Image (cartoon, grey):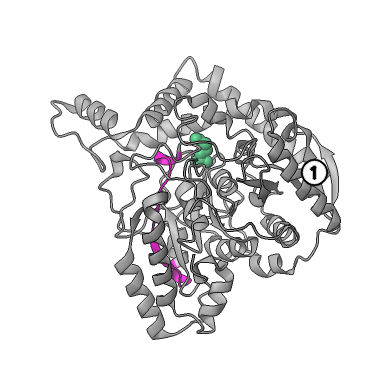
Amino acid sequence: MSDLCSLDLTDLRDRLAGKQVSAREAVSACLERIEKTEPAVHALLNVQADAALETAQALDQAGPDSTKPLWGVPLVIKDALCTAGVPTTCASKILENFTPFYDATAVAKLKAAGAVLLGKANMDEFAMGSSTENSAFGRTANPWDLGRVPGGSSGGSAAAVAAGQAFGSLGTDTGGSIRLPASFCGVHGIKPTYGRVSRYGLVAYGSSLDQIGPLCRSAKDLAAVLEVISGHDPKDSTSAPRPVPAFEAETAARKDLSGLRLGMPEEYFGEGLTDEVRACCEKALEAAKSLGAEIVPVRLPHTRYAIATYYIVAMAEASSNLARFDGVRYGYRHAGAQDLTDLYELSRSEGFGEEVQRRIVLGTYVLSAGYYDAYYRKAAQVRRLIRQDFLDAFAACDVIVGPASPFVAFGLGEKAGDPLQMYLSDIFTISLNLSGLPGLSLPVGLGADSGMPVGLQMFGRAFDESTLLGAAHALSGTLGPLPAPKGL
Ligand code: GLN
C-alpha cells in the first residue's frame, strides 16, 4: 500500500490543508489502490473516477479552504444513500437503474465540507444481512482473509477503508451494520444516537432503527466525519434539534480514562463467546484500567430477547418501507405483465432477492390483523424493557463495554444458507438500535487462533458520542494500531 493510502483521514486532511499533498494526488492514490485491490475485494459497486478527479482538480485550483473541514478528502458512501447523478442501487436488482437527482443530507454535508466522492460501497441488499453476501451484485471479501466475509451490511464501506481504497466511508446501522463490519475488518465505526444524523435521502429499511455513521481508521477520524454529518435537518422530522459538539477537538483532548466507569455486562461475556474474542476484549479492558478506568459489573437481563424482538420490529418496518417498490413508480418493472397484480407480483419477485422477500413476508405477517398483538405489539413492549436495561445500567456506569461479535469474521458461504445462524451474529449489536443509543466498535487486536481483527464495542448515553469517541481514542493510543491487512 502506498504511504499516502495508509494515512489516517485527519493526517491526510492536515497535509492537504498544508499543501503537502494535493487533492488530485490523494484521489489518484485511492484510484490506483482501487484498481489494484478491487478484483480481489469487490468493496465498491461503482467508481466515479472521472468525476472525482475533476472535483479534485477544481479544489486544487481554488486552493485549500479552512472553512471546509474535509477539504480534498476522498471517501466512499454506502449504496443505500442517495447521490445526485450517481446510481444508488441498495445492492438490489429492483433499483439497478435508479439514479437519484438529489444527495442525501449526510452526503450533501460531506460535499459542502470539501470531501470527494470516490464511489458507492457494496452492501447486503437493502441493508438486510450481516455478511454482504446478500448483495445482488456479488459479495465483498474481507481484506484480512479473502476467504472470509467482511461483515454486513456495510461490508463494502468497511472493506474499502481496510483495503486503503478510501480514508473513510459512510455506512448505515439498523442492527449493527456499521459496528459488525468495522470489527470484522479491523476499522473503527460509530452508530450515532438515533436522530443525531439526518436520514433524509437514506433508502429506509427499519425507520425507527436506521442511523448513518462513519467508518474510519481512527476514533479521531470518526469524530471529524461525524462532526460534519451531524445536526438537525428540517427534511427529517426525526433528526434532533441539538447543537453538534466539537467532536474532533473533544476526542483529541482525551488522554486517559480517569474518572470513567466502564460497565461490563455479564450477558455479553457469557457462553458462546469464542476464546480469542474474549481474550482480546479482556486485554483491552486491562489496558483501560491502566488508563484510569474503573470496571463495574452491570446487567442487561433482556439481552436474550433482543434477536427475536429486533427481527420482528425490523421486518415489520421493512415490509412497510419496501411496499413503495412496486414496479410502477421507479425501479425494476417486469415487461410482460398482463394486469396490475401481475405487474406487482412479477416485478417484486424478480427484483427482490431471497432474504428481502423473506423479510417482507414475515414483516407483513407480524403486522397482519390477528397476529399484530401476538408479535408486533409484544415486540414493541419488550423493546421498551431492553431500553430500560440500558438506562438502569447507566446509573452505575458511564460507558458499557462488550465484544462487537461473539466471533471473528466467518468464512464466505459458512452461514449464507442458514438465516437463523446469520441473525445470531447480531446478538451484541441490535439491542443498541432498539434503544436508540450511540455505540462504536474499535479494533483491539488480532484473535490468537484466526489472526483476524477483534472489535470492542462501547455504548453510551443518548447524544454522548463524545465520551465514546474520547474513550476509544485514548484506548487505541495505548493498544496501538493493527498491522496492515494481510489478505492483500
Ligand atoms: N444484520 C442485521 C439485519 O440483517 C442488521 C442490518 C443492519 O444493521 N442494516 O437486519
Instruction: Look at mark 1 in the image and give the residue it sits on.
Output: 263
Q: Is residue 339 left or right of residue 44?
A: left
Residue closest to the eye, 440 or 378: 440
Give the answer, above or below, for where 69 lies relative to 86.
Answer: below
x 15%, y 26%: residue? 339
Residue closest to the eye, 54 or 276: 276
x 45%, y 61%: residue? 165
Q: Is residue 464 left or right of residue 139?
A: right
Residue 207 at least partly seen: no
Q: Is residue 96 magenta?
A: no
x 45%, y 63%: residue? 75
Give the answer, above or below, for where 45 lies relative to 53.
Answer: above
The percent coordinates of residue 102 (x first, y second) are 34, 59
Start-end of magenta stretch:
111-127
Residue type at the position of mark 1: Gly
Residue closest to the eye, 484 or 183: 484
x 55%, y 68%: residue? 7
